[in-house]
Image: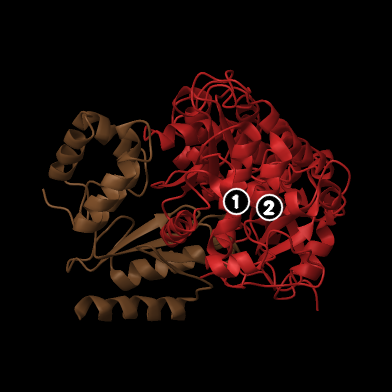
Chain colours: A red, B brown
């Protein structure tokens, strides 16, 4: 069980029930549970979609697409059954928030899936939980069974005449299937290889039926929006970036942890106040702001609001909310190598630029970090990354290329310091810089 | 091929969850592996038969997912995360320590069959790094000393 933390600046929406025993369905009901879905039943499909659109809720998995807009793409009439798929394949390095949602508030996810189903006219939802999260899958299984036992799921939910079923599904270890089209392949129990788009999942998804795929945090936010109203939720964050976010603070921090902060919260404050700053009297070197695939920010680039648009303006991405903090003892080349080792391991191999690109980059970085680098390697790595961008079915190729380009562009000197057979300058202990 | 009653009832229930039989394959493989220790030829043949798939179809899926294995592992599979968040807080040192302590490397198994070791990618414990998973159990905020206690605990449990 993961430890909970708190900070006075937190605005608890999704984390409102954390630590309150809400896995128990009676406790969940005491804490306003299953009220949102009943309200949603009275709002009608268009009413729900408009409310979520107006709330400014954007996908918490990383892409930041408007959730309401995504739902509106699902055709009203479809010859095949429609599905809602909850993405709980959390595996972007730096990200550990969905874990807390499933651990503390699984019924909120169930309610979110039901409301999404009502919004798009679907009768079936799936909650996909990554294989490593076995204890969370068991929590979800119990929560679904409890909801059925109360008659909240199944036939004629809340006397509405509408039916809704939710099923659990466990993965077996694969980062790639966190990507929506590969996730559908994985749920159909094939190799998790992405599908080409168009057609988009909203039109042709699971077993050919229209499918809405949302991150677990996105879906867990929906009941709060339905109960609190779009305006309240939108006003928690800056324009077009409604609500709050679970930020996973990790790396060189005094108080790492998952904190729920309003969208647009200042990154410097997040690191130095919420996260307690850098331990061992070290200085900040860099931050990866939204999971391993997002371009690194230097220590002088952190006076930004943590919302989708502000981080994009700063040349990176808000991503999945994983804020990884690096102090000045960290070797960027080594960090880039570990990042690339991950993408090379996780590339499904379907698209050549990603399969070959990640492998070449990993091999080059291994040689480079070991002191066998050539000056031309630096530009070659950048050029190779540049040529992976946008040339793959899914964003895994981009996810490997973008951070690499940023590491080279922003820390070129560190790459040069590894040239000519020199040992890594960070391997030996460095004296503290601040007294 | 005999699975437990729990496996059989879960399998029967799962078949009602999807419009195609195939969709139970991945969760079923993992549950079968939990019981048998690994995915033997016999398990693969049995599941292929039940789901109207070829054995090749099943093997094709197994080779994709990192948690599935066709080789026996130790009773306790120690999975050390060395991805970025864990690396920054000593994940690599932890792996090195486990290698020395257990006398095995990545994907190795101790001669008594008690422990296996694996260097794994992000397990979703970044804010509680460095972290290790032993089978499905998380151990977080580890140090070398805490890791020793974790391993000793499993060694005792395994001997009992």
Kind of element beneath mark 2: helix
CB atoms at circles 1 and 2 under 8 Å apart?
yes
Q: Is residue B22 above or below residue A30?
A: above
Letter of the chain that mark 1 sits on in the rendering:
A
Judged from the image, the secondary structure of the residue bearing numbered disc 1 is helix
Q: Residue at x 53, y 22 (%)?
A: A204
Residue B78 on image: x %, y %: 35, 64
| Residue B75 x/y as whole percent | 24, 65
Quadrant in the picture for residue A62: top right
Residue at x 33% of width, y 73% of height: B101
Q: Position of residue B145 (x, y in %)?
A: 45, 81
For the residue pair A144 and A219, the one nearer the viewer reads as: A144
- Mark closer to the chain start, 1 or 2: 2
Local crowd at mark 1 within 10 Å, few (<14), some, or many (≥20)? many
Q: Which mark is residue A3?
A: none
- Which residue is identified by label 2? A36
Q: Is residue A419 visible?
A: no
User: Which of these two is toward me, A411 or A301?
Assistant: A301
Question: Which residue is tagged 1?
Answer: A111
Instruction: Please give left or right for residue B59 compared with residue A431 in the image.
Output: left
Report the chain holding disc 2: A
Nearer the observer, A15 or A290: A15
Q: Residue at left 61%, top 72%?
A: A19
Cα–Cα span, label 1 and label 2: 8 Å
């Amino acid at each position: 069980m993961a430890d909970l933390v708190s900070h006075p600046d937190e605005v608890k929406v999704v984390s409102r029930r954390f630590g309150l025993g809400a896995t128990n369905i009676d406790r969940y009901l005491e804490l306003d549970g299953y009220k949102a879905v009943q309200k949603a039943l009275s709002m009608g499909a268009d009413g729900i979609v408009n409310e979520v659109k107006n709330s400014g809720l954007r996908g918490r998995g990383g892409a930041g697409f408007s959730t309401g807009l995504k739902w509106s793409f699902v055709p009203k009439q479809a010859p095949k059954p429609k599905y809602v798929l909850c993405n709980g394949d959390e595996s972007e390095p730096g990200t550990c928030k969905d874990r807390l949602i499933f651990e503390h508030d699984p019924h909120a996810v169930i309610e979110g899936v039901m409301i999404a189903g009502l919004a798009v006219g679907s009768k079936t939802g799936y909650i996909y939980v990554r294989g490593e999260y076995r204890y969370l899958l068991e929590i979800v299984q119990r929560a679904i069974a409890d909801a059925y036992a109360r008659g909240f799921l199944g036939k004629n939910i809340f006397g509405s005449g509408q039916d809704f079923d939710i099923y659990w599904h466990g993965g077996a270890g694969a980062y790639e299937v966190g990507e929506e089209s590969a996730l559908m392949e994985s749920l159909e129990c094939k190799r998790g290889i992405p599908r080409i788009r168009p057609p988009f999942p909203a039109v042709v998804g699971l077993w050919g039926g229209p499918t809405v795929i949302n991150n677990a945090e996105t879906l867990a936010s929906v009941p709060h929006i339905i109960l609190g109203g779009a305006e309240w939720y939108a006003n928690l964050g800056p324009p077009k970036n409604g609500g709050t976010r679970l930020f996973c603070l990790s790396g060189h921090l005094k108080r790492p942890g998952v904190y729920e902060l309003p969208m647009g919260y200042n990154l410097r404050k997040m690191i130095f106040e919420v996260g307690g700053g850098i331990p061992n009297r070290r200085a900040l070197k860099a931050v990866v702001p939204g999971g391993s695939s997002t371009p690194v920010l230097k220590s002088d680039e952190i006076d930004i609001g943590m919302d989708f648009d502000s981080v994009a303006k700063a040349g990176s991405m808000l991503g999945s909310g994983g804020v990884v903090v690096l102090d000045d003892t960290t070797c960027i080349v080594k960090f880039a190598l570990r990042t690339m080792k991950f993408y090379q391991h996780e590339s499904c191999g379907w698209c050549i630029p990603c399969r070959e690109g990640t492998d070449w980059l990993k091999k080059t970085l291994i040689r480079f970090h070991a002191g066998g680098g050539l000056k031309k390697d630096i530009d070659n790595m950048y050029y190779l990354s540049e040529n992976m961008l946008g040339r793959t079915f899914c964003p895994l190729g981009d996810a490997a290329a973008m951070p690499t380009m940023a590491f080279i562009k922003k820390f070129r000197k560190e790459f040069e310091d590894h040239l000519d057979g020199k040992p890594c300058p960070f391997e030996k202990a460095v004296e503290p810089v601040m007294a | 091929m005999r699975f437990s009653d729990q496996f059989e009832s879960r399998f029967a229930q799962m078949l009602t969850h999807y419009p195609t039989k195939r969709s139970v394959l991945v969760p079923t493989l993992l549950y079968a592996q939990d019981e048998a220790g690994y995915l033997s030829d016999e398990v693969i043949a049995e599941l292929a038969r039940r789901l109207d798939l070829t054995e090749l179809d099943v093997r094709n899926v197994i080779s994709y997912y990192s948690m599935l294995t066709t080789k026996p592992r130790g009773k306790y599979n120690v999975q050390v995360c060395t991805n970025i968040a864990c690396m920054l807080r000593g994940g690599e040192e932890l792996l090195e320590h486990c290698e020395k302590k257990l006398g095995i490397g990545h994907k190795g198994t101790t001669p008594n069959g008690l422990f296996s070791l694996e260097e794994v990618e992000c397990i979703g414990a970044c804010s509680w790094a460095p972290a290790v998973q032993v089978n499905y159990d998380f151990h977080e905020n580890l140090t070398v000393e805490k890791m020793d206690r974790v391993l000793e605990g499993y060694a005792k449990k395994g001997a009992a």
